[in-house]
Amino acid sequence: MSAHNKVAESRLYNEDLAPVPPERRTWGLWNIAALWIGMAVCIPTYTLAAGLISQGMSWQQALFTITLGNLVVLIPMVLNAHAGTKYGIPFPVLLRASFGTVGANIPALMRALVACGWFGIQTWIGGSAIYTLHAAIFDFAPAGPSDLIPVLGLSLGQLACFLLFWAVNIAIIIAGIDTIKWLETFAAPFLLLIGVGLLWWGVSTAGGFGVVFSEQSLAQVRGNLAGEFSFWRAFWPNLTAMVAFWATLSLNIPDFTRYARSQRDQVLGQLIGLPATMALYSFIGIAVTCATVVIFGTAIWDPVQLLGRFTNPLAVGFALFALTIATLSTNIAANVVSPANDFSNLWPRRITFKRGGLITGLIGVLIFPWRLYNDLGSYIFTWLIGYGSLLGAIGGVMIADYFALRRCALSTADLYLETGAYAYGGSGSNWRALLALALGIAPNVPGFLAQASGGVVSVPPFFAALYAHAWFVSFFAAGLVYVALNLAAPVSTLATSAAKT
């Protein structure tokens, strides 16, 4: 039997996980940049500076921290993207090289669970925008306590709008990756124009940048803070949070760069699309929020609440349409593609990309995201970003394996064979990678539990301080441990896998 036939008949293979052939690698620099613009423009990005400024940072310090965090996470982003572009393989298949054909499912599912949480939250935000749009256009009062359906805690209208937006997401999933490419390419220039337009409205209505960034406006945005503020004490944990914001995408970026035409396109596309967009929209969020102090007499960070202050139904309708597009473009690319491939990797012969996307969508409903959204700060900025920090360990193992040990050389065929070079003696799991993953995460677990429990779990100050650098700790610890384990107990597959196919 030929090598091609062996791969095609393997239980680890399906068309969605297969290497993308050269003729289908059509994503250029603009497509990659547009992908990041579409993902980065969302409500969490707009409000990202809120937490930093509320701790006492100036708007310049907040913007610096956000921009630096995205430049830092760009490094593992570009490095992990390399294999996707070179071999045309998705994230869970790349994981097989370091973790094994079976062991890869552990880090893949860890990544998928974060994405499912984000998918539910973003779908609820999109559904809420649709509901608010209808309320503004048809002039009806928002749902009250008496309108809520028992158990669900939603009104019939809220549930209908949530399911409508959920159905739009599912329809795009079913349409396939080319539709996602089209959506991101269309959304990018539209969302940039909307952001600049919102900035122009806020600054011009408030009376110019001098008024917007006056000490009086900034004091109200910052709120009443007690005690002395230390920038460097606040900087490190917030830098970690900024890195962790997109740390999950730095793992599964091969899901997209497998379609890139060249390494140049993926590197420059990400450099142009990620840090610049995050900095721009964070700045827009800061400036417009400062402008609301002058215009409305109070700081309004939530763009949905801001739109609720408008009286022109046409303006509200257009703005909320833009908000819906922004949420949709973020949700599909950031929160569906990865778990769809990750679930497919569990059982490639039965679970296709589309079925994996449907599983993601189902979990997104079952977690009751509207309840989680009531405590958005705790859920997103403690659980999801905190969990993302722990996932730095996966990136540490992947990059150490691909660059330090394999020198970018993989056997593509063996990635799909149960008895190939990445079967690790037949078990399908590389104990070195799994142990390095566990040891990379372990130092941060006490601090994570203390943070996630709101202080109920008490830990020594050392672990609390360590958690302020969680992503960096897990990333470098796992990578170094993995290299050390391979030096102490070399694996023979490194030699055989160096022969590319």
Image (spheres, rainbow, N blue to C red):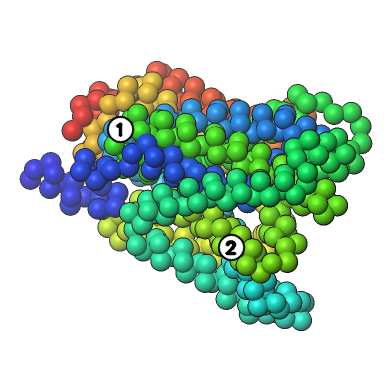
Q: Which residue is mark 2?
A: 318
Q: Indicate whether 478 appears above or below 53.
A: above
- Real-space Cα separation, disc 2 to disc 1, in angstroms: 37 Å
Task: Kindly identify the amino acid type of the residue bearing the numbered disc 1.
Answer: Ser
Task: Name the element at disc 1.
Answer: loop
Residue 112 seen by the camera: no
**Foreground tag (2 vs 1):** 2
Query: Residue 254's x, y, as percent?
Result: 38, 40
Q: Which residue is mark 1?
A: 262
Query: Residue 42's x, y, as percent?
Result: 58, 50
Task: Give the quarter of the figure containing the C terminus.
Answer: top left
Task: Give the quarter of the figure containing the N terminus.
Answer: top left
Q: Indicate whether 246 appears above or below 72.
A: below
Name the residue located 54 percent from the left edge and 46 percent from the top edge. Answer: 192
Q: Is residue 161 left or right of residue 84?
A: right
Please name whichever residue, 135 or 152, is drawn nearer the observer in this view of the structure.
135
Residue at the outermost right position = 226
Q: Is residue 179 left or right of residue 191?
A: left
Task: Kindly identify the amino acid type of the residue bearing the numbered disc 2.
Answer: Phe
Name the residue located 61 percent from the left edge and 42 percent from the top edge. Answer: 281
Task: Name the element at disc 2.
Answer: helix
N-term mark: 2 or 1: 1
Please name whichever residue, 6 or 121, is drawn nearer the observer in this view of the structure.
121
Q: Quadrant of residue 314?
A: bottom right
Name the residue located 20 percent from the left edge and 26 percent from the top edge. Answer: 499
Q: Residues within 10 Å of mark 1 (few under 14, many from 20)?
A: some
Q: Indicate whether 211 appears above or below 79.
A: below
Query: Residue 31's x, y, as percent?
Result: 38, 43
Residue 406 seen by the camera: yes
